[in-house]
Structure formats: structure tokens, C-alpha cells
Image (spheres, coloured by chain):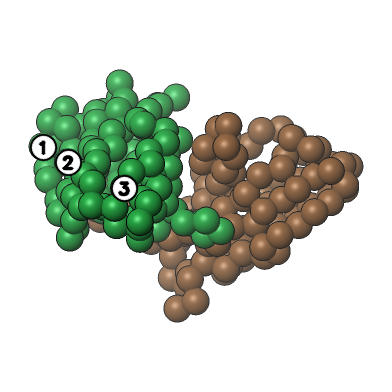
């Protein structure tokens, strides 16, 4: 079973601060995705990274895939209350031809105004 | 498109009762996934279908759980008999994944069905 460990599990910060969330595994993934989930809703895709070392930016969010494709990070600059939510990373396995996604347990982010 | 539609949104039942959760995937999507989310274990994949055929049900916890996909636009997850430890939010997700050459598998989730078994 492939495991994805996310850290920290909980993060509470003030508006305007920067933060980084990590997603680590001992397994290699063919691709890795980040989702955000708000209360009472399902996860919504933010980004997909597929190449080792890849960096993608989505406004104030920067996503990086590790060179060995075993880890990823999400950095948020100048966090806003609207960034509050559960951030989930999910990896696709080569063994299952990429169709099966394994999710980390998530990082619950709270941005206080 | 209305997205992935799940019903019911909330269900409260007593231990031993049968529970049926329903899902309508996005039209044109060929893969359907059932996940369970709890505080303790996060999001766990229960089963997924490709072209209405169950591909991997290794995440189904026990024989009390069963899932069907009789056609491309409908799936059910049934728990019989239900137990308090089955209390969780159950998510259905769909995708149009066609293999690694088509890119990464991007899931669209429904809003979930919150199940409470007393």
C-alpha cells in the first residue's frame, strides 16, 4: 500500500502570512495532484504535476513536485481567509496504470482575518 | 453540467438497517470511484469502476459493503447490515481517464453523503 504523509496536519495562521504544506512518500508516483475541500463539499482539484522538479503557480499558490517524484509541496503567499480549507495531496501509481489515486490525510488550514 | 450528484446528502439510521447511497456521474465520464472519509483515516478508496465494470474492490471493508454500476449514469453503494463504525462521509467521484497516455486521472467529486449509524 502506498502511503502519502502530509504535514502539518493542522495550521492556523493570520491573514497575510506565508505557509508551506508538505506531502511525502517512499513511493514514486506517475503524477501528483492537490485538492482543496471546504466544509460540506467534496474535494476540488487545484493542480496536477507530472514531471519531477516541476513547479506550477496558481495565483498566490506555488506547487512543486520533487525531483524523484516522491514528494510535493504547496506554498501559499500572503494567505487570505478564503484560503481556509482542507488541502489534500493525491498520488497516481504506475502499478495501476495511473487510474487509482491514493490520498494523504490532509492539512487543515485556517486563515484568521 | 450539474456535476456528480449524490443522494441522500444526509442519512441517520439505526444499527442493523440497510443503507443505499446513490451516485450519478458526469455524463461522458467512464470511471467512477467510491471513497469514504473519516477524521481518523482520511479519504479511503472503497471501489472503482471503468466502463461500468468493477476494477478494484480491495478497499471494501467487509462483505456488508457492496457496490453496483448497472449503467454509465448510475451507481449504488449498499451497506447491509449497517454498524456504528460505518458512520462517515461517503464520496462518489467520476473521471474521463483513458490511460496514462491521456494524462493524469482528474477526479470530480460529488458533495458527499453523510451517514450516521446509531
The circle on residue B103 is: none
Please give left or right for residue A98 compared with residue B23 in the image: left
Q: Which residue is mark 2?
A: A64
Q: Earlier in the sequence, mark 2 or mark 3?
A: 3
1 and 2 marks on the same chain: yes
Q: Nearer the viewer, residue B45 or B103?
A: B45
Discs 1, 2 touching: Cβ within 8 Å: yes
What residue sits 40% from the left and 58% below the top? A44
Residue at figure coordinates x 12%, y 45% from the top left: A55
Secondary structure type for disc 3:
strand
Query: In the picture provided, is B88 more to the left or to the right than B73?
Result: right
Q: Chain of mark 1?
A: A
Quadrant where the N terminus of chain B sits is bottom left
Chain letter for mark 3 = A
Q: Nearer the viewer, mark 2 or mark 3?
A: 3
Badge 1: how crowded within 10 Å, few (<14), some, or many (20+)?
some
Distance between mark 2 and mark 3 Cα atoms: 24 Å
Considering only order in the chain, which callout, 1 or 3, is on the residue closer to the N terminus? 3
State the residue position of label 1.
A53
Q: CA distance from mark 3 to mark 1?
A: 30 Å
Residue A50 coordinates in the image, percent (x, y): 19, 44
Residue that numbered label 3 is attached to: A14
Q: Looking at the image, which residue sits at the far top? A: A26
User: In the rendered image, what is the letter of the chain coloured green?
Assistant: A
Chain letter of disc 2?
A
Vertical placement of A92 versus B50: above or below?
A: above
Q: Which chain is displayed in brown in the rendered image?
A: B
Amino acid at each position: 500500500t502506498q502511503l502519502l504523509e502530509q504535514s502539518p496536519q493542522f495550521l492556523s495562521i493570520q491573514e497575510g502570512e506565508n505557509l508551506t504544506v508538505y506531502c511525502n512518500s517512499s513511493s514514486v508516483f506517475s503524477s501528483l495532484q492537490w485538492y482543496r475541500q471546504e466544509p460540506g463539499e467534496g474535494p476540488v482539484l487545484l493542480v496536477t504535476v507530472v514531471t519531477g522538479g516541476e513547479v506550477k503557480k496558481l495565483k498566490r499558490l506555488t506547487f512543486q513536485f520533487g525531483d524523484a517524484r516522491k514528494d510535493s509541496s504547496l506554498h501559499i503567499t500572503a494567505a487570505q481567509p478564503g484560503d481556509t480549507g482542507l488541502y489534500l495531496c493525491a498520488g497516481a501509481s504506475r502499478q495501476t496504470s495511473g487510474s487509482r489515486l491514493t490520498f494523504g490525510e490532509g492539512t487543515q488550514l485556517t486563515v484568521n482575518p | 453540467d450539474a456535476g456528480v450528484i449524490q443522494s441522500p446528502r444526509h442519512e441517520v439510521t439505526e444499527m442493523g438497517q440497510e443503507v443505499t447511497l446513490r451516485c450519478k456521474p458526469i455524463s461522458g465520464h467512464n470511471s467512477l470511484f467510491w471513497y469514504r472519509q473519516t477524521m481518523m483515516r482520511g479519504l479511503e478508496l472503497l471501489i472503482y469502476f471503468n466502463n461500468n465494470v468493477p476494477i478494484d474492490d480491495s478497499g471494501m471493508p467487509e462483505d456488508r459493503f457492496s457496490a453496483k454500476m448497472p449503467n454509465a449514469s448510475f451507481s449504488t453503494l449498499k451497506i447491509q447490515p449497517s454498524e456504528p463504525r460505518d458512520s462517515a462521509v461517503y464520496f462518489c467521484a467520476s473521471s474521463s481517464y483513458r490511460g496514462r497516455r491521456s494524462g493524469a486521472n482528474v477526479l470530480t467529486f460529488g458533495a458527499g453523503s453523510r451517514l450516521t449509524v446509531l
